Amino acid sequence: MKVRRSAATALASVFAVGALAACGTQPTTSSSAPAHGSKQLQIFSWWTGVASSKALAALNKQFVKEYPQYKVINEAVAGGAGSNAKAVLASRLEAGNPPGTFQVHAGHGSLYSWVQAGDLSPLNSLYKQQGWYHDYPSSLLKLLTFHGKIYAVPVDMQRDNVLWYNPTVFHRYHLSVPRTFSQFFHDARVLKSHGITPLALANHGNWEATLLWSDVLLGTVGPTQYDALLSGHASWTSPGVIQATRTFTKMLSYANTDYTALHWDQADQLVAQGKAGMNIMGDWAQGYFTTDLHLTPGKGFGWAPTPGSAGTFAVVSDVFGLPSHLKNKTPTLDYLKVLGSQKGQAIFNPLKGTFSPRLDANPKAYDAYSQSAMKSYKRDKLVLTIGQGAVNPGFTTGVENAMEILVSNHNVSQFVHAVANAAKSNPLP
Amino acid sequence: MKRAVPGNARPKRIIAATKKRTLSWDNWSAVLVLIPSLLALGIFVYGFIVWTGYVSLTNWNSYIPNFQWAGFRNYLAVFQTFRFQSDIRNIIVFTVLFIFGCLALGLFLAVLIDQKIRWESLFRSIFIFPMAISFVATGVIWSWLLNPQTGVNLILQSLGDTHPPQWFLSTVFVPSLSVGLIQAGIPLALVAVSIAAVWQMSGFAMAIYLGGLRAIPEEMKEAARIDGAGPWRLFWTIIFPQLKSSTITAVIILSAASLKVFGLIYAMTGPGQDFTTDMPTLNMFQTTFQGSQFADGAAIATLLFLIMAAFSIPYLLTVLRKEEEA
C-alpha cells in the first residue's frame, strides 16, 4: 500500500516536473542557450528592406566572426514601417520572453517606455569598459540616458531636417538655396511664376506633413525652445508654435495639390524630374536619389538644412539595448560590443545608406551627402523629432490626426489647441 | 447523423427511448473531432472579443499595460474626437454607396448574362474576376486611375473638360451640413473610393442575382408573356419581386465586407484630408499600433464589433429560422 502510494506520488511529480519544464522551455529557447551546441542570440528589428537586411546580415556575420560560439537568429518582423514589429515586441516583453536585443529609436518614445516599464537594463559599465563615453557625442548619449543611466547603444544616424532641391532648376532661375523662411518664399514665388511647383509634398501616410511641420517649428523657434517643447517644459499654444503653423500653412499654398495621393518618394521624384523645386524629407531620401534614380549627389540633387535650422541636426537613430528579463546577458553584451564598435558600424552603415554616429568614423567610407551630414552631426546641436518614434507615440498620433485637419482647413488655432491637448493626454517627459 | 428511427408513424415514446442512448461511438467521435476547432474558436475568436472588450474599459493607453478600471471613459473620449465622428459618417455613406452600386450593377450584369447569350461563361468569369484581386491591389490601381494629375482626368481634359473632378482628393461635402464637430454630408472623396469597391464586388452581386434569376420557373415568365406583359413589365412585376431573398443575402454579405473595409482605404487614400475617407478600422489600427493607445483602440474595435453585430445577427436569426422550418 505504502509502496503504491509513493509510486503514485512519484508519477505525479514526474508529470508536474514535465509540465513545469514544458512551461519553462518555451521562453528560454528565444533568448539564451540551449543545453548543448552553440548559444543562440535573437536579434529583433524591422529591418526587412533590401539595404537594411543586407546591412544587418553583414553585421551579424562580423559578430559571429569575433564570437564564433554564438549563433545569431534574425527575428526581423516586416510591415507597417515598424509598427508590426513594435506590436510583436510589446507582446513578447509583456510575456517575459524578450529577444536577445531589439531595435528602437533614440529619444523619449518607445525607448523611454521600455525603460519605465523596467524592460531594459542600464549599460553604464559597458560604456565605461568600451570607452564609448568618448567615442560618441555626449548630446547623442543624452538622448539615451534617463535618470543618469544609459540604456542603449546607437548603431546608425539619419537626419530629419533636410531640404532637397534640384540644382539645375535653381541654377536656371538664379536662385540661392533658402536659409530663412523669407528666402524660401522668395524662391517659391520665382519658381511658381515659371510654372514649377515650388515645394513637392507627399502626405499619403499622414506622417510626411507632420515631418515638414516639425522642421518648420524647429526653424522658427530655434533648437532650445524646440527642445523645451518636446520635453514638456514649454507651452504648445505659445506664439512661436502659432507662427510656425502659419508659416507651414503658407508653405502649403506653394505645394502640389495632390499630396494626399503621393508617397514620400514620389515627391522626391518630382524634384528629381525638375517638376518641383524643393522637398523637405529625412535623409533616407538620398538613398532614393542615388540608388533608385542613379543621381549624383550635388549634381542630380542638392541639399541643405531646412530653413532656419542650420546648426541643428534632427536625429533619427536606431539603437539597441539590453532586455532586463534575459536569463543570460553575456551573448547580448557581446553583440552590443560589436554593434557599437568602429569596425561593426563601418561594415553596417555604408550598406544601409546611413552613417556611423561614432566620432572616429571614417568619412571616406561614405558618399558626398553622408560626408557633409557627418560634418554637421559632429558640430551641430542634436534635437529629437516629432515623428519617427522619437517622442511619446500617442502624442505623435495626436499631432498627425490634427495635421490631417489642418492641411484641409488651415485653421491654425484649432490645430495648436489639438496639439496642446495631445501633449496633455500623452505626457512628454 | 444516423437517424435511428425513420418515418413518422412510430409512437413518440420509442423515439424518446432511442434518444436516451444516443451517445454512441459515432457521436463521441464527432465531439472529439469538433473539440480542437471549438477550442481554437473559443480562445482566438470569442476569448479575444471578450479580452478586447475588457481592455477597452481600462487605462491601457501606452506601451506599458495598465489595467486600472476606466469605465466608459475611453468610449466617451473616442466619441468626442473629430476623427471618430468622421468615421461614423464615412462608414454609413460608404456602405450605402457601395451596396447600392454593387446591387444595381450586379443586377444589370446578371440580367444581361441571363439573355442566353453566346460565350456566357466567359462573360461571367470576366465580371466576377475582380473579386479574385486583393483589395490592396485594387486600391493601388484605382489610386493611380483616379489621381487628378495622372489618371482618367487626362482623358477628360483632352475631351475638353476644364474642371475635371478631384476624385478622392476632394474635400467637398454634398450637402454641407454641420453636425457636432463634422460636416454631415456625403464626402465626394468617398464616391471615388466607392467606384473602386463597386468595381471589385459587383461581380459577386451578379453571381447571386444570376442564381436567383435561374431559380425563377420558366412557366411563370411564359404565363406572364401569354397574358401580354412586355419585357419591362415582366421584369418589374414578375422577376424582380422574386429576387428578394437574393437581395437580402447580397446586402448582408456586402455590408459585412463594407464595414470591415481596411485594405482598400489603406492602399488607396489613407485617412484622407480632413478624414474624408477614414474608416473605423483604419482609426483603430493607427490608434492601437502606431499611437500605442491600446484602450482607445479596443474601444473603437468594440464599437465596430457592435455595429457589425447589429447587421449580421438579424440575418443569422432568419437563416436559422429558415433551416428549422426546412
Image (cartoon, coloured by chain):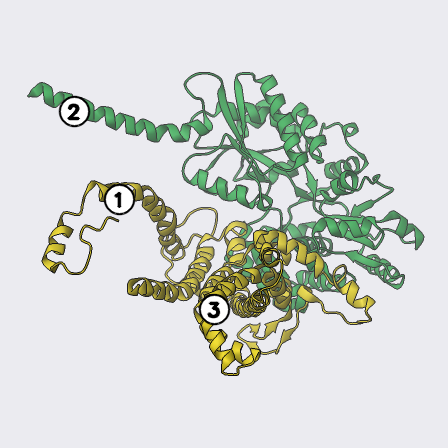
Sequence-first disc among 3 and 1: 1
The answer to whether residue B206 of the structure is visible from this angle is yes
Point 71% across, 63% down: residue: A243
Q: How many marks?
A: 3
- Amino acid type assigned to the residue bearing label 3 in the image: Thr
- Residue A395 percent coordinates (x, y): 56, 54
Q: Which residue in the protein does label 2 denote?
A: A9
Q: CA distance from mark 3 to mark 1?
A: 36 Å
Q: Is A211 rendered above or below residue B183?
A: above
Give residue A261's mark.
Answer: none
* Mark in the foreground, 3 or 1: 3
- Amino acid type assigned to the residue bearing label 1 in the image: Val
Q: Residues within 10 Å of mark 3 (few under 14, many from 20)?
A: some
Q: Is A219 rendered above or below residue A134?
A: below
Q: Residues within 10 Å of mark 2 (few under 14, many from 20)?
A: few
Quarter-of-image position of residue A18 = top left
Quarter-of-image position of residue A201 = bottom right
Q: Is residue B64 left or right of residue B86?
A: left
Chain assignment, label 2: A
Q: CA distance from mark 2 to mark 1?
A: 33 Å
Callouts 3 and 1 on one subunit = yes
Q: CA distance from mark 2 to mark 3?
A: 65 Å
- Amino acid type assigned to the residue bearing label 2 in the image: Thr
2 and 1 marks in contact (CB < 8 Å)? no
Point 68% across, 60% down: residue: A240
Chain assignment, label 1: B
Q: Which residue in the protein does label 1 denote?
A: B31
- Residue B215 percent coordinates (x, y): 45, 66
**Chain displayed in green:** A
**Chain displayed in yellow:** B
Chain assignment, label 3: B
The answer to whether residue A233 of the structure is visible from this angle is no
